[in-house]
Amino acid sequence: MKLFLATIAILFSFVSATGQSAPVLDSLQKEYLKPKPFKERGNLLIQLASATMSVNPDQADKYGEELIALASNQPDKEALIKSYNANGVRCAGWAGIRNYAEKAMNYFEAGKALAVKHNLKKYETNILLQQANLQLSVPDLHKASKYLEEATTLNANKNDSISAELAFTRGDIQLARNEKINALRSYLTALRLGDSLKMAPLQRNGLLKMSGFYGSIEDYDKAIAYYEKAMDKLKELPAAYRGLYLKVTDLKTIGDLYAFQKNYNLAKTYYENSIKLADSLQYQPLKIHGYIGLLNVFIFMKEPQKSMAFMRSKQGQDLTAYLSTLKMDAIADQANAIIYSEMGQLDSAGKYFRKSADFFNNSGNPIYKMSNLVQTAYYLKRKGDYRQAINLFLQADTLAKSNGQLDKLIEINKNLDTLYTNLGDYRQAKFHSSAYYQYKDSFQTLNKEKQLSQIEADDALQQLQREQLLQEEKKNERNN
Protein backbone atom coordinates (compact mmCIF):
# COMPACT_ATOMS: atom_id res chain seq x y z
CA MET A 1 0.00 0.00 0.00
CA LYS A 2 2.99 2.33 -0.15
CA LEU A 3 1.76 3.56 -3.50
CA PHE A 4 -1.48 4.87 -2.07
CA LEU A 5 0.44 6.75 0.59
CA ALA A 6 2.76 8.20 -2.04
CA THR A 7 -0.14 9.22 -4.27
CA ILE A 8 -1.64 11.45 -1.63
CA ALA A 9 1.57 12.55 0.06
CA ILE A 10 3.06 13.93 -3.14
CA LEU A 11 -0.07 15.91 -3.89
CA PHE A 12 0.26 17.64 -0.53
CA SER A 13 4.04 18.00 -0.45
CA PHE A 14 3.74 21.70 -1.14
CA VAL A 15 1.17 22.53 1.55
CA SER A 16 3.64 22.94 4.39
CA ALA A 17 6.20 24.78 2.31
CA THR A 18 3.66 27.45 1.46
CA GLY A 19 1.53 27.15 4.55
CA GLN A 20 0.31 30.19 6.39
CA SER A 21 -2.01 30.15 9.36
CA ALA A 22 -5.50 31.54 8.74
CA PRO A 23 -4.76 34.76 10.68
CA VAL A 24 -1.57 35.35 8.67
CA LEU A 25 -3.39 34.67 5.39
CA ASP A 26 -6.09 37.15 6.42
CA SER A 27 -3.37 39.68 7.17
CA LEU A 28 -1.81 39.18 3.72
CA GLN A 29 -5.18 39.69 2.06
CA LYS A 30 -5.72 42.93 4.00
CA GLU A 31 -2.28 44.15 2.92
CA TYR A 32 -3.22 43.30 -0.67
CA LEU A 33 -5.95 45.96 -0.58
CA LYS A 34 -3.45 48.71 0.28
CA PRO A 35 -1.47 50.63 -2.38
CA LYS A 36 2.20 49.59 -2.42
CA PRO A 37 5.35 50.13 -4.49
CA PHE A 38 6.18 47.39 -7.00
CA LYS A 39 8.76 45.49 -4.96
CA GLU A 40 6.51 45.20 -1.90
CA ARG A 41 3.44 44.30 -3.97
CA GLY A 42 5.44 41.73 -5.94
CA ASN A 43 6.63 39.99 -2.78
CA LEU A 44 3.11 40.13 -1.38
CA LEU A 45 1.65 38.53 -4.52
CA ILE A 46 4.24 35.73 -4.38
CA GLN A 47 3.29 35.01 -0.76
CA LEU A 48 -0.43 35.19 -1.49
CA ALA A 49 -0.21 32.93 -4.54
CA SER A 50 1.81 30.35 -2.62
CA ALA A 51 -0.31 30.44 0.53
CA THR A 52 -3.61 30.36 -1.37
CA MET A 53 -2.50 27.40 -3.49
CA SER A 54 -3.43 24.94 -0.76
CA VAL A 55 -6.93 26.34 -0.20
CA ASN A 56 -8.01 27.93 -3.50
CA PRO A 57 -5.80 27.05 -6.51
CA ASP A 58 -7.86 29.14 -8.93
CA GLN A 59 -7.36 32.25 -6.82
CA ALA A 60 -3.66 31.41 -6.49
CA ASP A 61 -3.40 31.36 -10.29
CA LYS A 62 -5.02 34.80 -10.43
CA TYR A 63 -2.48 36.21 -7.98
CA GLY A 64 0.30 34.63 -10.05
CA GLU A 65 -0.94 36.17 -13.28
CA GLU A 66 -1.33 39.54 -11.59
CA LEU A 67 2.32 39.32 -10.55
CA ILE A 68 3.38 38.70 -14.16
CA ALA A 69 1.23 41.55 -15.47
CA LEU A 70 2.67 43.90 -12.87
CA ALA A 71 6.27 42.85 -13.60
CA SER A 72 5.81 43.22 -17.35
CA ASN A 73 5.34 46.97 -16.89
CA GLN A 74 8.57 47.43 -14.92
CA PRO A 75 11.79 48.78 -16.46
CA ASP A 76 13.83 46.24 -14.47
CA LYS A 77 14.45 43.38 -16.91
CA GLU A 78 14.96 40.94 -14.03
CA ALA A 79 11.50 41.56 -12.53
CA LEU A 80 9.61 39.60 -15.18
CA ILE A 81 12.09 36.71 -15.04
CA LYS A 82 11.61 36.49 -11.28
CA SER A 83 7.83 36.55 -11.64
CA TYR A 84 7.84 33.69 -14.16
CA ASN A 85 10.22 31.70 -11.95
CA ALA A 86 8.09 32.28 -8.83
CA ASN A 87 5.02 31.00 -10.65
CA GLY A 88 6.96 28.02 -11.96
CA VAL A 89 8.12 27.08 -8.47
CA ARG A 90 4.58 27.43 -7.13
CA CYS A 91 3.10 25.14 -9.80
CA ALA A 92 6.00 22.67 -9.65
CA GLY A 93 5.09 21.96 -6.04
CA TRP A 94 1.86 20.43 -7.36
CA ALA A 95 3.45 18.57 -10.27
CA GLY A 96 1.62 15.40 -9.25
CA ILE A 97 -1.32 16.95 -11.06
CA ARG A 98 -0.59 17.00 -14.79
CA ASN A 99 -2.07 20.46 -15.38
CA TYR A 100 0.29 22.07 -12.90
CA ALA A 101 3.34 20.24 -14.22
CA GLU A 102 2.60 21.72 -17.65
CA LYS A 103 1.96 25.17 -16.18
CA ALA A 104 5.24 25.04 -14.27
CA MET A 105 7.21 24.11 -17.39
CA ASN A 106 5.59 26.91 -19.40
CA TYR A 107 6.45 29.48 -16.73
CA PHE A 108 10.04 28.23 -16.52
CA GLU A 109 10.44 28.31 -20.30
CA ALA A 110 9.17 31.90 -20.45
CA GLY A 111 11.55 33.00 -17.71
CA LYS A 112 14.49 31.14 -19.24
CA ALA A 113 13.89 32.71 -22.66
CA LEU A 114 14.13 36.17 -21.11
CA ALA A 115 17.25 35.23 -19.15
CA VAL A 116 18.93 34.02 -22.35
CA LYS A 117 17.82 37.13 -24.23
CA HIS A 118 19.38 39.43 -21.63
CA ASN A 119 22.41 37.18 -21.00
CA LEU A 120 21.54 36.70 -17.32
CA LYS A 121 23.28 33.39 -16.73
CA LYS A 122 22.54 33.30 -13.00
CA TYR A 123 18.80 33.22 -13.68
CA GLU A 124 19.18 30.82 -16.59
CA THR A 125 21.13 28.40 -14.39
CA ASN A 126 18.59 28.57 -11.59
CA ILE A 127 15.65 27.96 -13.94
CA LEU A 128 17.41 25.00 -15.59
CA LEU A 129 17.90 23.54 -12.12
CA GLN A 130 14.21 24.03 -11.36
CA GLN A 131 13.33 22.30 -14.64
CA ALA A 132 15.56 19.35 -13.76
CA ASN A 133 13.79 18.96 -10.43
CA LEU A 134 10.40 19.25 -12.12
CA GLN A 135 11.27 16.45 -14.55
CA LEU A 136 12.38 14.31 -11.62
CA SER A 137 8.91 14.57 -10.13
CA VAL A 138 7.13 13.76 -13.43
CA PRO A 139 9.30 11.48 -13.70
CA ASP A 140 11.46 11.78 -16.81
CA LEU A 141 15.08 11.05 -15.89
CA HIS A 142 16.40 11.70 -19.40
CA LYS A 143 15.04 15.24 -19.46
CA ALA A 144 16.05 15.81 -15.85
CA SER A 145 19.65 14.88 -16.71
CA LYS A 146 19.61 17.13 -19.78
CA TYR A 147 18.52 20.19 -17.81
CA LEU A 148 20.98 19.42 -15.02
CA GLU A 149 23.95 19.17 -17.37
CA GLU A 150 23.02 22.46 -19.05
CA ALA A 151 22.85 24.14 -15.64
CA THR A 152 26.14 22.55 -14.56
CA THR A 153 27.90 23.83 -17.68
CA LEU A 154 26.70 27.38 -17.00
CA ASN A 155 27.79 27.16 -13.37
CA ALA A 156 31.22 25.62 -14.04
CA ASN A 157 34.14 26.42 -11.71
CA LYS A 158 31.93 28.02 -9.08
CA ASN A 159 31.75 27.11 -5.42
CA ASP A 160 28.45 28.60 -4.34
CA SER A 161 24.98 27.64 -3.12
CA ILE A 162 23.85 26.83 -6.68
CA SER A 163 26.74 24.35 -6.93
CA ALA A 164 25.41 22.62 -3.83
CA GLU A 165 21.87 22.53 -5.23
CA LEU A 166 23.20 21.07 -8.49
CA ALA A 167 24.95 18.33 -6.52
CA PHE A 168 21.75 17.56 -4.61
CA THR A 169 19.79 17.20 -7.85
CA ARG A 170 22.55 15.09 -9.39
CA GLY A 171 22.27 12.80 -6.38
CA ASP A 172 18.50 12.58 -6.82
CA ILE A 173 18.90 11.53 -10.45
CA GLN A 174 21.58 8.98 -9.56
CA LEU A 175 19.39 7.55 -6.81
CA ALA A 176 16.46 7.26 -9.22
CA ARG A 177 18.79 5.31 -11.53
CA ASN A 178 19.77 3.02 -8.64
CA GLU A 179 23.34 4.42 -8.68
CA LYS A 180 23.30 4.51 -4.91
CA ILE A 181 26.94 5.07 -4.01
CA ASN A 182 27.30 7.82 -6.61
CA ALA A 183 24.17 9.42 -5.17
CA LEU A 184 25.66 9.27 -1.68
CA ARG A 185 28.85 10.96 -2.88
CA SER A 186 26.84 13.73 -4.56
CA TYR A 187 24.80 14.34 -1.41
CA LEU A 188 27.90 14.43 0.78
CA THR A 189 29.63 16.83 -1.62
CA ALA A 190 26.66 19.19 -1.42
CA LEU A 191 26.40 18.80 2.35
CA ARG A 192 30.08 19.68 2.83
CA LEU A 193 29.66 22.73 0.60
CA GLY A 194 26.65 23.79 2.66
CA ASP A 195 28.74 23.42 5.82
CA SER A 196 31.58 25.48 4.35
CA LEU A 197 29.14 28.22 3.32
CA LYS A 198 27.48 28.02 6.76
CA MET A 199 24.05 28.09 5.12
CA ALA A 200 21.45 26.40 7.32
CA PRO A 201 18.95 25.77 4.47
CA LEU A 202 21.60 23.89 2.49
CA GLN A 203 22.71 21.98 5.58
CA ARG A 204 19.13 20.97 6.31
CA ASN A 205 18.57 19.93 2.70
CA GLY A 206 21.68 17.77 2.88
CA LEU A 207 20.39 16.00 5.98
CA LEU A 208 17.04 15.42 4.27
CA LYS A 209 18.81 13.94 1.23
CA MET A 210 20.83 11.63 3.49
CA SER A 211 17.61 10.50 5.13
CA GLY A 212 16.09 9.83 1.72
CA PHE A 213 19.17 7.88 0.67
CA TYR A 214 19.07 5.58 3.69
CA GLY A 215 15.32 5.19 3.28
CA SER A 216 15.92 4.01 -0.30
CA ILE A 217 18.13 1.16 0.96
CA GLU A 218 15.63 0.44 3.76
CA ASP A 219 18.00 1.38 6.57
CA TYR A 220 15.19 3.13 8.38
CA ASP A 221 17.07 3.67 11.64
CA LYS A 222 19.62 5.88 9.87
CA ALA A 223 16.90 7.49 7.74
CA ILE A 224 15.01 8.49 10.88
CA ALA A 225 18.17 9.73 12.61
CA TYR A 226 19.05 12.03 9.70
CA TYR A 227 15.49 13.33 9.45
CA GLU A 228 15.47 14.15 13.15
CA LYS A 229 18.75 16.06 12.68
CA ALA A 230 17.14 17.95 9.79
CA MET A 231 14.17 18.81 11.99
CA ASP A 232 16.53 20.12 14.68
CA LYS A 233 18.05 22.38 12.02
CA LEU A 234 14.74 24.23 11.64
CA LYS A 235 15.58 26.55 14.52
CA GLU A 236 18.59 27.83 12.56
CA LEU A 237 16.59 28.75 9.45
CA PRO A 238 15.78 32.38 8.63
CA ALA A 239 12.28 33.49 9.65
CA ALA A 240 11.19 33.49 6.00
CA TYR A 241 11.34 29.68 5.96
CA ARG A 242 8.50 29.39 8.51
CA GLY A 243 10.07 26.59 10.52
CA LEU A 244 6.94 25.57 12.43
CA TYR A 245 5.08 24.93 9.18
CA LEU A 246 7.92 22.76 7.92
CA LYS A 247 7.99 20.89 11.24
CA VAL A 248 4.42 19.71 10.61
CA THR A 249 5.63 17.90 7.49
CA ASP A 250 8.79 16.69 9.22
CA LEU A 251 6.75 14.99 11.94
CA LYS A 252 4.52 13.38 9.35
CA THR A 253 7.47 12.14 7.25
CA ILE A 254 9.22 10.62 10.28
CA GLY A 255 5.90 8.90 10.95
CA ASP A 256 6.01 7.52 7.40
CA LEU A 257 9.48 6.09 8.03
CA TYR A 258 8.27 4.35 11.17
CA ALA A 259 5.28 3.03 9.21
CA PHE A 260 7.57 1.59 6.52
CA GLN A 261 9.53 0.01 9.38
CA LYS A 262 6.18 -1.46 10.57
CA ASN A 263 6.47 0.37 13.88
CA TYR A 264 2.87 1.50 13.63
CA ASN A 265 2.43 2.76 17.19
CA LEU A 266 5.33 5.22 16.86
CA ALA A 267 4.10 6.19 13.41
CA LYS A 268 0.70 7.09 14.84
CA THR A 269 2.35 9.13 17.60
CA TYR A 270 4.22 11.25 15.05
CA TYR A 271 1.09 11.70 12.92
CA GLU A 272 -0.89 12.83 15.96
CA ASN A 273 1.87 15.27 16.95
CA SER A 274 1.85 16.64 13.40
CA ILE A 275 -1.91 17.23 13.67
CA LYS A 276 -1.57 18.92 17.08
CA LEU A 277 1.12 21.29 15.81
CA ALA A 278 -0.92 22.14 12.70
CA ASP A 279 -3.94 22.78 14.91
CA SER A 280 -1.92 25.20 17.05
CA LEU A 281 -1.01 27.12 13.88
CA GLN A 282 -4.72 27.51 13.05
CA TYR A 283 -4.25 26.30 9.49
CA GLN A 284 -6.54 23.47 8.43
CA PRO A 285 -4.65 22.25 5.31
CA LEU A 286 -1.55 21.44 7.37
CA LYS A 287 -3.55 18.92 9.40
CA ILE A 288 -4.16 16.92 6.24
CA HIS A 289 -0.63 15.50 6.41
CA GLY A 290 -1.33 13.76 9.70
CA TYR A 291 -4.78 12.61 8.62
CA ILE A 292 -3.28 10.93 5.56
CA GLY A 293 -0.70 9.21 7.73
CA LEU A 294 -3.27 7.84 10.16
CA LEU A 295 -5.47 6.55 7.33
CA ASN A 296 -2.59 4.77 5.68
CA VAL A 297 -1.41 3.13 8.90
CA PHE A 298 -4.76 1.35 9.05
CA ILE A 299 -4.44 0.43 5.36
CA PHE A 300 -0.88 -0.88 5.92
CA MET A 301 -2.13 -2.94 8.87
CA LYS A 302 -4.88 -4.51 6.72
CA GLU A 303 -7.58 -3.30 9.11
CA PRO A 304 -10.31 -2.03 6.77
CA GLN A 305 -12.85 -1.60 9.58
CA LYS A 306 -10.53 0.87 11.31
CA SER A 307 -9.85 2.56 7.97
CA MET A 308 -13.58 2.99 7.40
CA ALA A 309 -14.09 4.26 10.96
CA PHE A 310 -11.41 6.87 10.26
CA MET A 311 -13.04 7.97 6.99
CA ARG A 312 -16.33 8.45 8.84
CA SER A 313 -14.71 10.32 11.74
CA LYS A 314 -14.40 14.10 11.99
CA GLN A 315 -10.80 13.83 10.79
CA GLY A 316 -11.78 11.73 7.78
CA GLN A 317 -14.59 14.11 6.92
CA ASP A 318 -12.17 17.05 7.11
CA LEU A 319 -9.81 15.21 4.75
CA THR A 320 -12.63 14.50 2.29
CA ALA A 321 -13.86 18.11 2.42
CA TYR A 322 -10.36 19.46 1.81
CA LEU A 323 -9.85 17.18 -1.18
CA SER A 324 -13.16 18.41 -2.57
CA THR A 325 -11.98 22.02 -2.20
CA LEU A 326 -8.98 21.14 -4.39
CA LYS A 327 -11.20 19.28 -6.87
CA MET A 328 -9.52 16.00 -5.91
CA ASP A 329 -12.59 14.15 -4.65
CA ALA A 330 -11.34 11.13 -6.59
CA ILE A 331 -8.59 10.51 -4.03
CA ALA A 332 -11.14 10.14 -1.22
CA ASP A 333 -13.23 7.99 -3.57
CA GLN A 334 -10.22 5.76 -4.21
CA ALA A 335 -9.64 5.39 -0.47
CA ASN A 336 -13.26 4.38 0.08
CA ALA A 337 -13.10 1.97 -2.87
CA ILE A 338 -10.01 0.22 -1.48
CA ILE A 339 -11.52 -0.04 2.00
CA TYR A 340 -14.88 -1.38 0.79
CA SER A 341 -13.09 -3.86 -1.48
CA GLU A 342 -11.00 -5.21 1.41
CA MET A 343 -14.16 -5.46 3.54
CA GLY A 344 -15.83 -7.55 0.83
CA GLN A 345 -18.54 -4.95 0.18
CA LEU A 346 -18.02 -5.13 -3.57
CA ASP A 347 -21.06 -3.17 -4.77
CA SER A 348 -19.96 -0.15 -2.74
CA ALA A 349 -16.35 -0.64 -3.83
CA GLY A 350 -17.38 -0.68 -7.48
CA LYS A 351 -19.32 2.55 -7.11
CA TYR A 352 -16.29 4.38 -5.71
CA PHE A 353 -13.83 2.88 -8.19
CA ARG A 354 -16.04 4.12 -11.04
CA LYS A 355 -16.22 7.59 -9.48
CA SER A 356 -12.43 7.85 -9.21
CA ALA A 357 -11.51 6.22 -12.55
CA ASP A 358 -11.36 9.31 -14.77
CA PHE A 359 -9.06 11.22 -12.40
CA PHE A 360 -6.46 8.45 -12.29
CA ASN A 361 -6.81 7.33 -15.92
CA ASN A 362 -6.13 10.90 -17.04
CA SER A 363 -3.28 11.40 -14.58
CA GLY A 364 0.02 12.39 -16.13
CA ASN A 365 1.85 10.43 -13.42
CA PRO A 366 2.27 6.74 -14.38
CA ILE A 367 2.76 5.66 -10.77
CA TYR A 368 -0.61 7.08 -9.71
CA LYS A 369 -2.26 5.46 -12.71
CA MET A 370 -0.63 2.08 -12.09
CA SER A 371 -1.60 2.11 -8.41
CA ASN A 372 -5.25 2.64 -9.28
CA LEU A 373 -5.17 -0.04 -11.99
CA VAL A 374 -3.83 -2.60 -9.50
CA GLN A 375 -6.37 -1.73 -6.82
CA THR A 376 -9.24 -1.87 -9.32
CA ALA A 377 -7.95 -5.21 -10.66
CA TYR A 378 -8.00 -6.66 -7.13
CA TYR A 379 -11.62 -5.55 -6.79
CA LEU A 380 -12.54 -7.23 -10.10
CA LYS A 381 -10.69 -10.38 -9.05
CA ARG A 382 -12.67 -10.52 -5.81
CA LYS A 383 -15.84 -9.94 -7.83
CA GLY A 384 -15.02 -12.88 -10.12
CA ASP A 385 -14.63 -10.76 -13.26
CA TYR A 386 -11.35 -12.44 -14.17
CA ARG A 387 -11.04 -11.25 -17.76
CA GLN A 388 -11.44 -7.58 -16.90
CA ALA A 389 -9.07 -8.02 -13.94
CA ILE A 390 -6.49 -9.50 -16.34
CA ASN A 391 -6.93 -6.54 -18.67
CA LEU A 392 -6.15 -4.06 -15.88
CA PHE A 393 -3.26 -6.10 -14.48
CA LEU A 394 -1.71 -6.21 -17.98
CA GLN A 395 -1.99 -2.41 -18.25
CA ALA A 396 -0.39 -2.09 -14.83
CA ASP A 397 2.34 -4.53 -15.90
CA THR A 398 3.28 -2.24 -18.80
CA LEU A 399 3.48 0.80 -16.52
CA ALA A 400 5.44 -1.08 -13.84
CA LYS A 401 7.99 -2.15 -16.45
CA SER A 402 8.45 1.43 -17.63
CA ASN A 403 8.90 2.56 -14.01
CA GLY A 404 11.25 -0.32 -13.14
CA GLN A 405 9.08 -1.35 -10.16
CA LEU A 406 10.17 -4.92 -9.47
CA ASP A 407 8.02 -5.33 -6.37
CA LYS A 408 4.88 -4.46 -8.33
CA LEU A 409 5.89 -6.68 -11.27
CA ILE A 410 6.16 -9.61 -8.84
CA GLU A 411 2.72 -8.85 -7.41
CA ILE A 412 1.10 -8.32 -10.82
CA ASN A 413 2.51 -11.44 -12.49
CA LYS A 414 1.61 -13.64 -9.53
CA ASN A 415 -1.99 -12.47 -9.89
CA LEU A 416 -1.94 -12.95 -13.67
CA ASP A 417 -0.71 -16.53 -13.18
CA THR A 418 -3.63 -17.22 -10.82
CA LEU A 419 -6.24 -15.54 -13.02
CA TYR A 420 -5.19 -17.31 -16.23
CA THR A 421 -5.15 -20.63 -14.33
CA ASN A 422 -8.70 -19.97 -13.13
CA LEU A 423 -9.74 -19.43 -16.77
CA GLY A 424 -7.96 -22.59 -17.92
CA ASP A 425 -5.46 -20.69 -20.09
CA TYR A 426 -2.42 -22.64 -18.91
CA ARG A 427 -0.07 -21.31 -21.60
CA GLN A 428 -0.51 -17.71 -20.41
CA ALA A 429 -0.45 -18.87 -16.80
CA LYS A 430 2.92 -20.53 -17.38
CA PHE A 431 4.26 -17.39 -19.07
CA HIS A 432 3.35 -15.19 -16.11
CA SER A 433 4.50 -17.80 -13.61
CA SER A 434 7.93 -17.74 -15.27
CA ALA A 435 7.91 -13.94 -15.22
CA TYR A 436 6.96 -14.00 -11.54
CA TYR A 437 9.97 -16.15 -10.60
CA GLN A 438 12.27 -14.12 -12.85
CA TYR A 439 11.23 -10.86 -11.19
CA LYS A 440 11.39 -12.48 -7.76
CA ASP A 441 14.98 -13.59 -8.38
CA SER A 442 15.86 -10.08 -9.57
CA PHE A 443 14.22 -8.62 -6.47
CA GLN A 444 16.19 -10.92 -4.18
CA THR A 445 19.38 -9.89 -5.98
CA LEU A 446 18.39 -6.26 -5.49
CA ASN A 447 17.84 -6.88 -1.77
CA LYS A 448 21.34 -8.32 -1.53
CA GLU A 449 22.62 -5.25 -3.35
CA LYS A 450 20.77 -3.07 -0.82
CA GLN A 451 22.54 -4.87 2.01
CA LEU A 452 25.84 -4.36 0.21
CA SER A 453 24.91 -0.72 -0.40
CA GLN A 454 24.42 -0.24 3.33
CA ILE A 455 27.94 -1.51 3.97
CA GLU A 456 29.42 0.49 1.08
CA ALA A 457 27.54 3.60 2.17
CA ASP A 458 28.91 3.35 5.69
CA ASP A 459 32.44 2.84 4.32
CA ALA A 460 32.12 5.77 1.91
CA LEU A 461 30.72 7.99 4.64
CA GLN A 462 33.54 7.12 7.04
CA GLN A 463 36.14 7.69 4.32
CA LEU A 464 34.73 11.11 3.42
CA GLN A 465 34.52 12.06 7.10
CA ARG A 466 38.17 11.06 7.56
CA GLU A 467 39.16 13.14 4.54
CA GLN A 468 37.22 16.12 5.87
CA LEU A 469 38.87 15.77 9.30
CA LEU A 470 42.31 15.55 7.67
CA GLN A 471 41.65 18.72 5.65
CA GLU A 472 40.57 20.55 8.80
CA GLU A 473 43.71 19.41 10.63
CA LYS A 474 45.93 20.65 7.78
CA LYS A 475 44.08 23.96 7.76
CA ASN A 476 44.60 24.36 11.51
CA GLU A 477 48.31 23.56 11.13
CA ARG A 478 48.69 26.27 8.47
CA ASN A 479 46.89 28.79 10.67
CA ASN A 480 49.20 27.97 13.57
Image (cartoon, grey):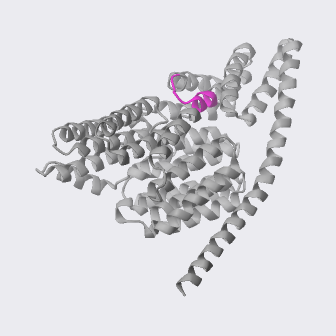
Q: Nearer the viewer, residue 260 or 281?
A: 260
Q: Residue at x 29, y 41 (%)?
A: 81
Left or right: 72 as drawn, with respect to 452: left
Vertical order, 437 against 164 (above or below): above
Residue depicted at 58% across the width and 35% down the height = 141
Q: Nearer the viewer, residue 411 or 185?
A: 185
Which one is in front, 62 or 194? 194
Answer yes or no: is residue 260 visible. Answer: no
Quadrant (top left/top right/bottom left/bottom right) for the C terminus? bottom right
The answer to whether residue 428 is above or below residue 473 is above
Q: Position of residue 344 (x, y in %)?
A: 69, 30
Residue 50 shown in magenta: no
Q: Nearer the viewer, residue 37 or 351?
A: 37
- Magenta residues, as a range? 362-372
Q: Is residue 260 left or right of residue 79?
A: right
Mainly helix, strand or loop, the magenta region?
A: helix
Residue 222: image quadrant is: bottom right
Residue 89 point in image, percent of width and height: 39, 43
Q: Is residue 419 left or right of residue 250?
A: right
